[in-house]
Image: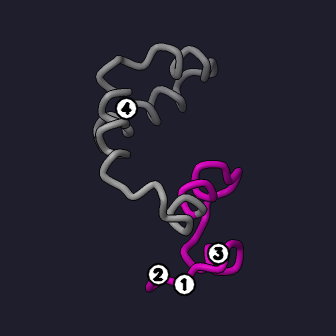
Amino acid sequence: MPGYVSEILRQLKDLKAKNEVINNLTLNFNRLLEKNWSQYKTNDTDFIRLISLITFSREPILINDVNKIIGLSECE
Protein backbone atom coordinates (compact mmCIF):
# COMPACT_ATOMS: atom_id res chain seq x y z
CA MET A 1 0.00 0.00 0.00
CA PRO A 2 2.67 2.60 0.88
CA GLY A 3 4.40 1.93 -2.44
CA TYR A 4 1.23 2.66 -4.42
CA VAL A 5 0.53 5.80 -2.41
CA SER A 6 4.12 7.04 -2.83
CA GLU A 7 3.95 6.50 -6.58
CA ILE A 8 0.64 8.36 -6.87
CA LEU A 9 1.99 11.27 -4.83
CA ARG A 10 5.09 11.40 -7.04
CA GLN A 11 2.93 11.45 -10.18
CA LEU A 12 0.68 14.14 -8.75
CA LYS A 13 3.71 16.32 -8.03
CA ASP A 14 5.21 15.72 -11.49
CA LEU A 15 2.05 16.09 -13.55
CA LYS A 16 -0.18 19.11 -13.56
CA ALA A 17 -3.17 17.11 -14.80
CA LYS A 18 -4.43 15.49 -11.60
CA ASN A 19 -7.43 14.03 -13.40
CA GLU A 20 -5.05 12.10 -15.66
CA VAL A 21 -3.38 10.46 -12.66
CA ILE A 22 -6.64 9.69 -10.86
CA ASN A 23 -8.44 8.41 -13.96
CA ASN A 24 -5.55 6.08 -14.86
CA LEU A 25 -5.24 4.18 -11.58
CA THR A 26 -4.91 0.43 -12.05
CA LEU A 27 -7.82 -1.81 -11.10
CA ASN A 28 -5.52 -3.46 -8.57
CA PHE A 29 -5.17 -0.16 -6.73
CA ASN A 30 -8.93 0.14 -6.34
CA ARG A 31 -9.12 -3.45 -5.07
CA LEU A 32 -6.30 -2.77 -2.63
CA LEU A 33 -8.14 0.25 -1.23
CA GLU A 34 -11.34 -1.77 -0.85
CA LYS A 35 -9.48 -4.59 0.90
CA ASN A 36 -7.78 -2.21 3.32
CA TRP A 37 -10.96 -0.24 4.01
CA SER A 38 -13.02 -3.39 4.71
CA GLN A 39 -10.96 -4.20 7.80
CA TYR A 40 -12.23 -1.11 9.64
CA LYS A 41 -15.49 -0.73 11.48
CA THR A 42 -17.39 1.67 9.29
CA ASN A 43 -20.10 2.05 11.93
CA ASP A 44 -17.60 3.76 14.26
CA THR A 45 -18.69 7.40 14.04
CA ASP A 46 -15.48 8.80 15.53
CA PHE A 47 -13.38 6.85 13.03
CA ILE A 48 -15.49 8.09 10.10
CA ARG A 49 -15.23 11.69 11.34
CA LEU A 50 -11.44 11.36 11.68
CA ILE A 51 -10.99 9.87 8.21
CA SER A 52 -13.28 12.54 6.74
CA LEU A 53 -11.29 15.30 8.41
CA ILE A 54 -7.98 13.95 7.12
CA THR A 55 -9.34 13.26 3.64
CA PHE A 56 -11.11 16.54 2.99
CA SER A 57 -8.84 18.97 4.82
CA ARG A 58 -7.15 21.46 2.53
CA GLU A 59 -4.27 21.79 4.98
CA PRO A 60 -2.15 19.23 6.83
CA ILE A 61 -3.74 18.10 10.10
CA LEU A 62 -1.69 17.66 13.28
CA ILE A 63 -2.83 15.30 16.04
CA ASN A 64 -3.45 18.26 18.36
CA ASP A 65 -5.72 19.81 15.74
CA VAL A 66 -7.99 16.75 15.69
CA ASN A 67 -9.20 17.32 19.23
CA LYS A 68 -9.84 21.00 18.58
CA ILE A 69 -11.76 20.34 15.37
CA ILE A 70 -13.82 17.22 16.08
CA GLY A 71 -13.30 16.62 19.79
CA LEU A 72 -11.28 13.39 19.73
CA SER A 73 -8.41 12.91 22.14
CA GLU A 74 -5.18 11.01 21.34
CA CYS A 75 -6.20 7.98 23.37
CA GLU A 76 -9.54 7.55 21.61
Q: Are marks 2 and 1 in contact (CB under 8 Å)?
A: yes
Looking at the image, residue 64 lies above or below residue 16: below
Give the mark, 4 or 3, whose residue is nearer the N terminus: 4
Give the mark, 4 or 2, whose residue is nearer the N terminus: 4
> Which quadrant: the N terminus?
top left
Q: Is 47 inside the magenta-drawn segment?
A: no
Q: Which mark is residue 7?
A: 4
Q: Which residues are magenta?
A: 50-76
As measured in the structure, the alpha-carbon distance from the residue carrying label 2 to the one carrying label 3 is: 14 Å
Give the mark, 3 or 1, whose residue is nearer the N terminus: 3
At horizontal 54% and vertical 75% (from top left) the residue drawn is 63
Label 2: which residue?
76
Looking at the image, residue 4 lies above or below residue 67: above
As measured in the structure, the alpha-carbon distance from the residue carrying label 4 to the one carrying label 1 is: 32 Å
Mark 4 vs mark 3: give the one in front.
3
Colour style of the rendered protein structure: one colour
Q: Position of residue 62 (x, y in %)?
A: 58, 71
Q: Is 67 inside the magenta-drawn segment?
A: yes
At horizontal 47% and vertical 26% (from top left) the residue drawn is 11
Q: Which mark is residue 42?
A: none
Q: Which mark is residue 65?
A: 3
As measured in the structure, the alpha-carbon distance from the residue carrying label 2 to the one carrying label 1 is: 6 Å
At horizontal 61% and vertical 18% (from top left) the residue drawn is 19
As measured in the structure, the alpha-carbon distance from the residue carrying label 4 to the one carrying label 3 is: 28 Å
Q: Secondary structure at mark 1?
A: loop
Q: Secondary structure at mark 3?
A: helix
Mark 2 vs mark 3: give the one in front.
2
Which amino acid type corresponds to the residue marked 1 in the rendered image? Ser
Q: Are marks 3 and 1 in contact (CB under 8 Å)?
A: no
Q: Which mark is residue 73?
A: 1
Q: Position of residue 28 (x, y in %)?
A: 29, 22
